[in-house]
Amino acid sequence: MHIAETVSATRDAIAAWKRAGETVALVPTMGNLHNGHLSLVREARRQADRVAVSVFVNPTQFGPGEDYDAYPRTLDQDSALLREEKADLLFIPSVDEMYPLGGNKTWVSVDDLGDHLCGANRPGHFRGVTTVVSKLFNIVQPDIAVFGEKDFQQLAVIRRMTAELMMPIRIVGAPTDREEDGLARSSRNGFLTAAERPRAALLHQHLQQARNAIAAGERDYRALEARLARALGEQGFQVDYFTVADAHTLAPAGPQHQDLVVAAAARLGQPRLIDNVTISLLNT
Ligand code: PAF
């Protein structure tokens, strides 16, 4: 596996593959890799000849007081895992390499889609994500890029950005990888205490309850949201949002919407956990 710290070294490696007619898939990550990330790498491997993985904890997607400094950085372990997965390239730029002119002045942002759900609680977060992902796309120029469906809103925002900016990149969403009790795998799960860890699975269970209620005919989504958010609160979660949204616009859904996502973000102790389930009412 080739390890590149600079934009130019990354471009040189990719250019050689492209000259040989090989396709390239990119898996952008912030490191602290777990099985969820490795499932994205495996998906990338299935879809392209070469797999590039970036590990970069992007400062512009963290707000003041968020966990940028505390975000786990485990590069030796990450590169060992990626070698086992036979990734071809690991790109590990510094902040200066990604933001060479200091304070960033050029932003890519997606209106509306980025304002709901996590966007409402983390102002500027998606602008940071789309800006850094655009940079990564410009550096690697992949044919395919793979993102996890756990970050449903991130995937929607990136799909929209790629389509509207006419980037010739196919965005692939990969299913959420879960622990046995249903907890979505996340780098932030490591911050759960032993006492919190079993309770964390309740987030997914409540999302499933919402999906079951909707499948059974519940259409008062605001009442459903309030009931399940309150139930999570009683279990010690601080709920940022628990929302039944239209899966296309991410705005709160009404009975007229057919494709739904039930998405939630909640803090349990230190970490903020996010998860979602989708439901299609077509043909029901
Ligand atoms: O999902 C993540 O890990 C990050 O938001 C991403 C896509 C790597 C951008 O920094």
Image (cartoon, helix red, strand yellow):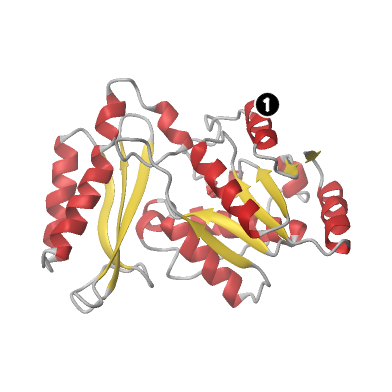
Q: Secondary structure at mark 1?
A: helix
Snapshot quadrant of residue 211? bottom left
The amino acid pointed to by label 1 is Asp
- Residue under the image location 44 percent in, 34 percent down: 188
Look at the picture and state if 78 lies above or below 110.
Answer: above
Q: Could you tell me which quadrant the N terminus lies in?
A: top right
Direction top: furthest residue: 194
Residue at the disc numbered 1: 76
Q: Could you tell me which quadrant the C terminus lies in?
A: bottom left
Q: Is mark 1 within 8 Å of ligand 1?
A: no
Give coordinates of residue 96: x percent, y percent: 75, 43
Specify whether residue 260 is in view.
Answer: yes
Snapshot quadrant of residue 205? top left
Give coordinates of residue 199: x percent, y percent: 24, 31
Horizontal side of 88 relative to 126 (left or right) equals right
Between 172 and 264, the residue placed more toward the observer is 172
Give coordinates of residue 17: x percent, y percent: 84, 57
Snapshot quadrant of residue 181? top left
Q: Residues within 10 Å of mark 1 (few under 14, many from 20)?
A: few
Between 132 and 217, the residue placed more toward the observer is 217
